[in-house]
Image: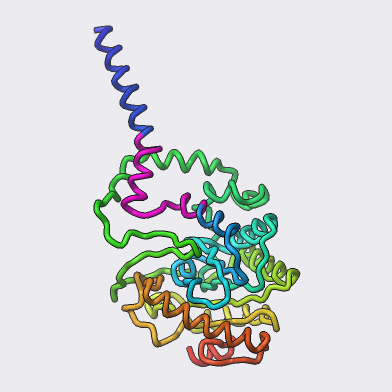
Amino acid sequence: MRLFVLQLFRFIGLFSVLYILFFLFVLPRLMVISQGPNIKDQVDQSFKNALNRDYDILVLGNSRTYRGINPDLIEIPTYNFSLDNDTYNQLYYKLKYLKTNNKKFKALILGMDYFQFSFISDTRNYAYASYFDSDYLNDYPSKNYVLLYHLRKLKPNRAEGLRFPRKNRPYLKQNGQFYREGKATPNDRANRDISRKEIQVKYFENILNYCAENNIKVFLLFLPTRENEMKSYTDNQIKEFHNFLDQYLTENVFLLNFTNDTTYSIDDFADITHLTPKAADRFSKQLNDTIMAIYLSSFTPSILNEGINNSEKFINSY
């Protein structure tokens, strides 16, 4: 009996070691082959390229800009430093990271979403903690994000996403754009919150102040958005939001609003929110033409043409 118990414990111990090794080291590599780079890999590659590449325009935003802007199609050297789920606090600390590493640029494309002020994201903190200074985590409850990240990797259901072979596997370009295919459906829905947390307003203002202090032009950018997503907001909420933005528009801060661009249809979206790679290329060319018009006019703020809207013009056309 004692021998049986001893052998049982040995078997359990060996199984546990193999289980941990598989889920911590083997499965992550298999998932990359099947699903594309994981978030930690994306963050590491994104930060590395942000320092190694030369650019005059920086793109910051959430998944909408991360997937929707192809820097290769913008005539001025551009790098996309966005990531899924980024909010303004992460974007501000990315600027601080670049400053610490002596990276300079002349203009910032700052992705805007009506819901982006409404929450503070912590889903990437296990990856960001090693890049941002210690002040970053002061805005969050005390948690060991790295430990929790590794514990989550041990969940057995993580293997459910494995598919071999997989066509059109997502990948991260050297220019910072994330490539992911998809196909939207008429039934796609989104439940968005347009409220504004004080902490995100503070970081949004910190970004604009940083740019003003460093003579960086800012383009506040709304990408094309599906009608199904815009149903989350009322006309009055949209109007109030743009009244809020109006106070920040200056001769160096421009509002580029493509929200209701009717040239984009459901076929141009991969899901409820994101443009397909093909539509992202088309939009990037459109964005390039808009930005170049402003550059060639020495950033004259009076320029208003299709795709360059002030708040009042947008509200009247909504």
In reply to whether residue 57 is colored magenta, the answer given is no
Residue at (48, 76) in percent of width and height: 73
Q: Position of residue 294 (x, y in %)?
A: 61, 86
Spot the residue most to the top: 2
Residue at (66, 79) in percent of width and height: 253
Q: Main secondary structure of the magenta part?
A: helix
Residue at (49, 91) in percent of width and height: 317
Q: Position of residue 70 (x, y in %)?
A: 47, 71
In the image, taking residue 198 as reference, residue 185 lies left or right, namely left
Viewer-closest of 97 and 227: 97
Viewer-closest of 24 and 145: 24
| Figure quadrant of residue 197 | bottom right
In this figure, what is the number of numbered marks?
0
Residue at (33, 50) in percent of width and height: 33
Viewer-closest of 308 and 299: 299
Spot the residue most to the right: 213
| Rendered-image quadrant of the N terminus | top left
In reply to whether residue 34 is colored magenta, the answer given is yes
Q: Position of residue 11 (x, y in %)?
A: 29, 20
Please say if 151 is above or below 285.
above
Please say if 272 is above or below 172.
below
Q: Position of residue 64 (x, y in %)?
A: 46, 69
In the image, taking residue 143 as reference, residue 97 lies left or right, namely right
Q: Which residues are magenta?
A: 22-44
In the image, taking residue 62 as reference, residue 153 lies left or right, namely left
How is the rendered protein coloured?
rainbow
| Figure quadrant of residue 302 | bottom right
| Figure quadrant of residue 269 | bottom left
Viewer-closest of 76 and 279: 76
